[in-house]
Amino acid sequence: DIVMTQSPDSLAVSLGERATINCKSSQSVLYSSNNKNYLAWYQQKPGQPPKLLIYWASTRESGVPARFSGSGSGTDFTLAISSLQAEDVAVYYCQQYYSPPYTFGQGTKLEIK
Amino acid sequence: EVQLVESGGGLVQPGGSLRLSCSASGFTFSSYSMNWVRQAPGKGLEWVSYISSSSSTIYFTDSVKGRFTISRDNAKNSLYLQMNSLRAEDTAVYYCARDQVTMVRGVTTPCGMDVWGQGTTVTVSS
């Protein structure tokens, strides 16, 4: 199984500042035939289901604000929020869909400082 | 409106069974692979199972293999999760989620789970 490890477990950032969350996979999730990383990022607010933010490691889902960006390839990935807004308080998860079981990271709780 | 609605959760004793349902609307259900994802109280997300659009491909996480069965009825726009031999550690909110795909150079390529239901709660306790 591919193990997904996020860091940090929690993060407090001031409004308007940049937030960065890291995700590392135990093996590469780069699909060589199409050069796509099978890595997604989700946002989950309390009492709500997860929401897809980013897929293929760096492609923003339709309707997701441009302040959210994803980067990385192979085994190391980053989710960045360029200017933190109050509504971004949530838990963020990375997930690999390269091979089953399609494992999630443990989550990173993002709060306002 | 694209929507997924889960049902069937409840309180069940250890060793018991439950059948979860997920009703889809607003999209061509038969064209999409589907997933079940669960979340134990206060914990993170755990992917549980996957079924392809035609039911030809099915996957499970190891902890539920042999106990859970996934199925779908495309005529009824419905996804199911039959859960047998339930354990306390199966206690969770269970979400169904649609597998988003797009064409890349003529090949269907997965791109995350883009539509989620609100979840149904399963509690396994005596």
Image (spheres, rainbow, N blue to C red):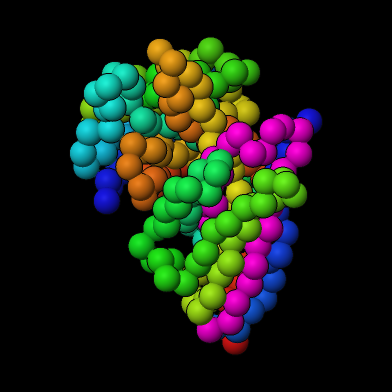
Where residue B44 sits in the image (x, y, percent)? 47, 52
| Residue A79 in sight from this viewpoint | yes
Residue drawn 39% across and 58% down?
B61
Q: Residue furthest left?
A: A27
The x, y position of residue B23, in whole percent, is 73, 49
Q: Left or right of B6: which side holds A62?
A: left
A27 sits left or right of B75 in the view:
left
At a point 39% along the width and 45% down the height, the residue shown is A102
Name the side, left or right, on which B1 lies relative to A34: right
Residue A81 appears in the rendering? no
Residue B30, percent across and down?
64, 39
Out of B34 and A72, give the one closest to the viewer.
B34
User: On screen, B55 above or below B61?
Assistant: above
Left or right: A100 in relation to B122: left
Position of A80 relative to B74 (above/below): above
Q: Nearer the viewer, residue A107 or A26?
A: A26
Vertical side of B85 occupied by B94: above or below: above
Q: How many labels does the image show?
A: 0
Q: Which residue is drawn at 27% across and 51% down?
A: A1
> x, y percentage for residue B82?
58, 67
Foreground pick, A93 / B109? B109
Question: What segment is highlighted magenta in the picture?
Answer: B15-38
In the image, residue B62 above or below residue B116: below
Residue B80 magenta: no
Q: Residue furthest bottom?
A: B126
Q: Residue at x 64, y 79 (%)?
A: B12
